Image (cartoon, rainbow, N blue to C red):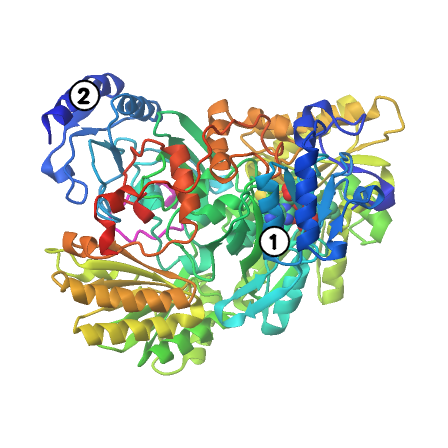
């Protein structure tokens, strides 16, 4: 995160703490104090004494996530230590119609873990047990608060790792990753969280504990797990989670290539992918991002580069060697003027350091900035980057680009100084225009940071009312009372009609006499 | 069919015919797992499919979607089937963006046609065609997968976006046409493996992979379930990056482990040599895929009659226990059980010959189900004779079934899409 250097925000209104369109998400109108009191009693009776926070000063520690621009103080914070405790709190919320919001490590960049003033924030930071590293099964079973990188640390002695690697992996939680379907630099080859989460215990918004998926693949029935992954905490809270472990590759080669322009770097990226080479990662940084990283961490990127690519190849040595030769050629053919292959872990770490610290580094060259997260088809990269540059020069708002070039996931950093009147507004306009560019190129409004509270208003630009209405059917099935992270993801929640309860009648199959045979 | 039902169908036909240019009376060949069908509508577009479903909703028709009809007997027979919505006219490969490695197709497109279209650019949709003649929609609805799942996963790992028609005729889409996208719920996941009970898929967007330049298969024989497991474990923990790790276990004991290696010519050569050294025994490499590779074992049975088709899933470490349970159960029941599947993914398919006594099938299913459940998995009877299906719980116990029912109630409150075909009577 940007620490003291700036506020990380995305395309949200800049003035004032909570923008008007977000009030449905924040619950300012909370008047269910009796319900809240009842939930507090249950929490006190169930959790350890220091696992229930209602002191106003302490509560404020939890008022925002990684999108520090939105702040709401929750009515209560609960820190369960077990699934049962967590479920008890949720059950109480359900009984008393009190909204709840799950929080892992609070690094989310779309305000997904923004609390409700009239609700409970349920934090998983005391659920950090790695239950099993099952080498033979290539799986790990972990609690939701476990830190992403700790899974890899625990699996490495066995020759395995957890592949999804968000830049925040030293602090973000597996539960948060699951909820956001987080990506990382190596998702180009290995896929996202949804490809690596194979099972989860889910505490439903009614407080029931159900198992979705598990150690084995293809569980019969609807793939509810696949639906819960990426649902941003709106379908319940995931607890013990089963993830895939990936065998460490025999060889890894990390290459830094300097280009004169993002056009050249984009062309090299396309050439590599078109040739059928699938690197583990292809990351791009433009001149402004390089300048920032250089100033912050002295990563020694090629001087005068208008763009760099960080390309990592991994796999069986025999393949990597061959692919490396191809990649080198494509870079050179497309104008790379400097190629640097990391020869030892220290050099590799230095190459990645520039990339991974880029967000924070930008904080040094600009007091404030917005992190955007749009996706475009990879082939549209050069065109969209030129359009962003044009937007930047016509508006006078600086934009640094750091992104996952291999899969077209852009992270433009829109720089501004909030102390200058109107600067925030101008930055926000550029940020919004970038999203429009993504949409008009057939892309998506978020590739990995989620919709949260921040982009809910953009959903209708990408989806029709019918699309959104259909998604709401899923929410109504899971959360008919709309208490699980309400107001996030969707601009307008749907009334769910009759609350589906447990079936009152025998199932038709049973009625027909068919099920008796079972 | 009752007279009342007949009259209802007759009035529905008029409405359907104005919704869709091809509406015909069903023939016995259209029956869905023995359940007779009244009408067949063949929409030519998503819009037509939506009109058809709207008309069906008005007349309260029970609808069963069909791609190319290669797996209509899978699952349980539907309670009723007034109307089959056949998607074979929606067979276009709509868009292949080679540079972006994506393809958009209509749901009735043949998987083979999609492969041919993207193959011309040296790309492939990494879904094995385990049932020849399958359409995209049917492949999604039944979530079939083959050997290649070890490296690239299954439909859920490849599907980027879907267009669906709901039971009420509303068209909706989710996901998109870019490889990375977390905006909104991933409805595609819900649709995969839903056996036509939730919505009708009309279009799908997939990510593609480059076709590798070279491949080799290393095969080695295994004498016992423990031996199979030992060999599979050796491969998956090595760093040879297998594209597939297949297990073949004949009814008579004894089997084969096959390891597919894909990549560059030089790379594959080296990895094949490493794999042979690793596995020892009679391990040897071939360029051609071994006979029966990736074919569902019941497809090996004579065409006449209906073999029982099983799917077993389990944690990788339970491979030997599942094989042993199958062998023991088959032995005790005096039947032939042929198992084949992805040892590297924890999936085995099983075939019991047509005509196998129902009690014997139940015995094998019970023992295998127990072994799979202990290994975090499940055993499903995908297909079988009417006697077999009537004689046992084919889907088996399903955790979270209440939540699944609630999803169904939201999407199809009148239970008009393939009712009774899916888990728990959904
Ligand atoms: C510097 C920095 C770099 C980042 N880099 C990346 C990156 O490369 N790729 C990427 O994808 N993201 C990145 N992120 C975003 C963020 O780290 C991820 O979204 C991460 O997965 C959030 O995890 P968390 O534990 O902090 O979740 P939180 O922020 O606490 O919560 C995120 C969302 O998940 C929900 N949630 C949390 N736990 C659960 C649970 N157990 N069950 C259900 N819902 C739950 C919350 O309600 C909320 O909606 C970055 C963030 C920062 C600050």
Residue A351 appears left or right of B409: right
Q: Is B77 part of what is drawn in magenta? A: no
The answer to whether the beta carbon of the residue marked 2 is less than 8 Å from any atom of ligand 1 is: no
- The magenta segment is B117-134
The residue labelled by disc 1 is A186
Q: Position of residue A150 (x, y in %)?
A: 67, 63
> How many numbered callouts?
2
Res A127 → quadrant = bottom right
- Work out whether residue B397 can be spotted: yes
Q: Secondary structure at mark 2?
A: helix
Q: Is residue B132 magenta?
A: yes
Left or right, B46 with reference to A2: left
Instruction: Using the image, name the chain to which the residue with label 1 belongs.
Output: A
Q: Which mark is residue B13?
A: 2
Q: Mark 1 vs mark 2: tell me if same chain.
A: no
Residue B263 or B359: which is nearer the viewer?
A: B359
Q: Nearer the viewer, residue A361 or B387?
A: B387
Main SS, magenta residues: loop
What residue do we see at 46% from left, 46% from top?
A: A224
Q: Is residue B191 among the parts visible in the rendering?
A: no
Residue A509 in the image, given as x and y percentages of width and height? 26, 45
Subunit under mark 2? B
**Residue at point 19%, 41% (across, down):** B32
């Amino acid at each position: 995160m940007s620490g003291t250097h700036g506020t990380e925000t995305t395309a949200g209104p800049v003035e004032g703490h909570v923008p008007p369109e977000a009030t449905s998400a924040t619950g300012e109108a909370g008047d269910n104090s009796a319900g809240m009191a009842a939930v507090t009693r249950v929490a006190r009776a169930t959790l350890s004494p220091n696992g229930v926070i209602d002191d106003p000063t302490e509560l404020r520690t939890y008022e925002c996530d990684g999108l520090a621009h939105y702040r709401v103080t929750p009515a209560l914070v609960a820190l369960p230590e077990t699934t049962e405790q967590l479920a008890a709190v949720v059950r109480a919320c359900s009984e008393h119609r009190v909204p709840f919001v799950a929080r892992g490590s609070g690094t989310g960049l779309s305000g997904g873990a923004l609390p409700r003033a009239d609700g409970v924030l349920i934090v998983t930071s005391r659920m950090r047990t790695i239950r099993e590293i099952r080498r033979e099964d290539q799986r790990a079973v972990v609690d939701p608060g476990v830190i992403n990188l700790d899974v890899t640390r625990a699996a490495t002695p066995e020759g395995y790792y957890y592949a999804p690697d968000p830049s925040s992996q030293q602090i973000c939680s597996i539960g948060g990753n699951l909820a956001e379907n987080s990506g990382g630099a190596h998702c180009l080859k290995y896929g996202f969280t949804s490809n690596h989460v194979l099972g989860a215990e889910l505490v439903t918004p009614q407080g029931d504990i159900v198992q979705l998926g598990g150690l084995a693949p293809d569980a019969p029935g609807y793939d509810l797990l696949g639906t819960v992954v990426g649902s941003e905490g709106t379908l319940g809270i995931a607890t013990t989670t089963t993830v895939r472990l990936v065998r460490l590759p025999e060889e890894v080669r990390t290459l830094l290539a300097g280009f004169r322009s993002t056009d050249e770097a984009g062309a090299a990226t396309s050439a590599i992918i078109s040739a059928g080479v699938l690197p583990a990662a292809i990351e791009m940084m433009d001149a402004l991002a390089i300048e920032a990283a250089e100033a912050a961490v002295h990563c020694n990127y090629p001087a005068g580069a208008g763009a760099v690519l960080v390309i990592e190849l991994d796999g069986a040595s025999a393949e990597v060697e061959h692919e490396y030769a191809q990649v080198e050629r494509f870079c050179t053919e497309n104008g790379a003027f400097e190629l640097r292959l990391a020869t030892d872990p220290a050099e590799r770490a230095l190459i990645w350091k520039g990339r991974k610290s880029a967000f924070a580094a930008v904080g040094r060259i600009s007091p404030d900035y917005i992190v955007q997260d749009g996706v475009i088809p990879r082939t549209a990269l050069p065109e969209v980057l030129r359009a962003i540059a044009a937007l930047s020069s016509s508006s006078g708002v600086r934009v640094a680009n750091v992104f996952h070039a291999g899969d077209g996931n852009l992270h433009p950093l829109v720089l501004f100084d909030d102390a200058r009147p109107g600067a925030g507004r101008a930055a926000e306009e550029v940020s919004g225009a970038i999203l429009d560019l993504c949409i008009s190129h057939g892309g998506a409004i978020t590739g990995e940071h989620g919709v949260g509270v921040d982009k809910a208003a953009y959903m209708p630009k990408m989806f029709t009312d019918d699309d959104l209405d259909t998604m709401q059917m899923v929410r109504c099935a899971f959360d008919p009372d709309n208490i699980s992270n309400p107001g996030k993801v969707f601009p307008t929640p749907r009334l769910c009609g009759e609350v589906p309860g447990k079936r009152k009648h025998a199932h038709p199959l049973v009625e027909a006499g068919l099920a008796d045979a079972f | 069919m009752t007279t009342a039902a007949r009259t209802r169908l007759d009035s529905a036909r008029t409405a359907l015919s104005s919704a869709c240019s091809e509406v015909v009376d069903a023939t016995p060949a259209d029956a869905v797992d023995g359940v007779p069908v009244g009408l067949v509508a063949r929409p030519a577009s998503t819009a037509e499919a939506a009109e058809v479903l709207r008309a069906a909703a008005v007349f309260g028709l029970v609808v069963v979607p069909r791609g190319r009809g290669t797996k209509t007997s899978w699952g349980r027979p539907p309670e009723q089937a007034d109307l089959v919505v056949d998607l074979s006219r929606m067979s276009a490969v709509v868009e292949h963006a080679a540079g972006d490695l994506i393809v958009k197709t209509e749901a009735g497109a043949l998987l083979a046609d999609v492969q041919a279209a993207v193959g011309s650019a040296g790309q492939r949709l990494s879904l094995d065609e385990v049932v020849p003649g399958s359409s995209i929609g049917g492949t999604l609805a039944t979530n079939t997968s083959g050997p290649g799942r070890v490296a690239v996963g299954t439909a859920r790992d490849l599907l980027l976006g879907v267009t669906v028609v709901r039971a009420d005729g509303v068209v909706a889409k989710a996901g998109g046409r870019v490889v990375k996208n977390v905006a909104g719920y991933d409805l595609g996941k819900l649709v995969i493996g839903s056996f036509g009970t939730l919505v009708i898929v009309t279009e799908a967007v997939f990510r593609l992979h480059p076709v590798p330049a070279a491949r080799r298969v290393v095969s080695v024989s295994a004498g016992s379930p423990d031996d199979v497991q030992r060999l599979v474990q050796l491969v998956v923990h090595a760093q040879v990056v297998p594209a597939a790790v297949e297990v073949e276990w004949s009814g008579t004991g004894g089997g084969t482990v096959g390891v597919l290696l894909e990549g560059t010519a030089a790379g594959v050569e080296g990895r094949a040599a490493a794999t042979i050294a690793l596995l020892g025994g009679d391990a040897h490499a071939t360029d051609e895929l071994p006979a029966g590779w990736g074919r569902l074992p019941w497809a090996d049975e004579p065409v006449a009659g209906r073999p029982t088709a099983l799917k077993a899933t389990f944690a990788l470490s339970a491979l030997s226990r599942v094989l042993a349970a199958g062998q023991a159960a088959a032995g005790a029941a005096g039947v032939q059980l042929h198992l084949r599947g992805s040892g590297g993914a924890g999936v085995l398919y099983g075939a019991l010959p047509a005509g196998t006594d129902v009690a014997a099938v139940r015995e094998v299913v019970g023992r295998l189900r127990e072994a799979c459940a202990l290994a975090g998995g499940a055993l499903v009877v995908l297909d079988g004779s009417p006697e077999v299906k009537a004689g046992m719980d084919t889907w088996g116990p399903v955790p979270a079934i209440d939540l699944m029912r609630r999803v169904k109630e939201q999407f199809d409150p009148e239970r008009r899409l393939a009712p009774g075909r899916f888990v728990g009577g959904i």
